[in-house]
Image (tube, rainbow, N blue to C red):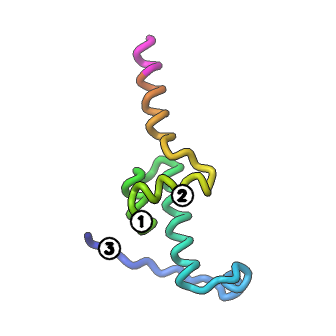
Amino acid sequence: MTTRNIVIEIPEKVLLAEKTDEVTFARELRILAAVKLYEMGRLSSGRAAELAGMSRVEFLLILGRYNVFPFQSELSDLESKRTSLSR
């Protein structure tokens, strides 16, 4: 798998406010970005898990920590299919 590096400058005051170091904060940012992009429907759970640096199962399990329902996209697909069948 080919990867790209993206550099984000974080003010030291943010790290101090979060009481964390660069490595821990970078890991949390990756997870937060993955969760949000999944929640918005922009990434599948598999791709979001890759971004977060974990397995798909691990990713689906942590979604509850962020109040994101793990199968929202599947539910939306089922609802749209049901609506189109009832027409």
What's drawn in magenta, residue-wise? 82-87
| Residue 54 numbered tag | 1
* Magenta segment main secondary structure: helix
Residue sitting at the far left: 1
What residue type is disc 3 on?
A: Thr
| Residue 3 numbered tag | 3
- Please name which of the two marks, 3 or 2, marks the residue nearer to the observer: 2
* Residue at 47% over, 47% down: 41
- Above or below, comparing residue 8 to residue 51 in the picture: below
- Residue 1 appears at what percent x and percent y? 26, 69
Instruction: Confirm or deny contact between disc 3 and disc 2 (CB under 8 A).
Output: no
Residue 71: within the magenta?
no
The local secondary structure at tag 3 comes to loop
Q: Quadrant of the C terminus?
A: top left
- Residue 67 appears at what percent x and percent y? 63, 50
CA distance separating discs 3 and 2: 23 Å
CA distance separating discs 1 and 2: 10 Å
Among the two numbered marks 3 and 2 on one chain, the one whose residue lies closer to the N terminus? 3
Residue corresponding to mark 2: 62
Instruction: Confirm or deny contact between disc 1 and disc 2 (CB under 8 A).
Output: yes
What residue type is disc 1 on?
A: Met
* Labels in figure, total: 3
Residue sitting at the far bottom: 12
What residue type is disc 2 on?
A: Ile
Residue sitting at the far top: 87
- Above or below, comparing residue 75 to residue 59 in the picture: above
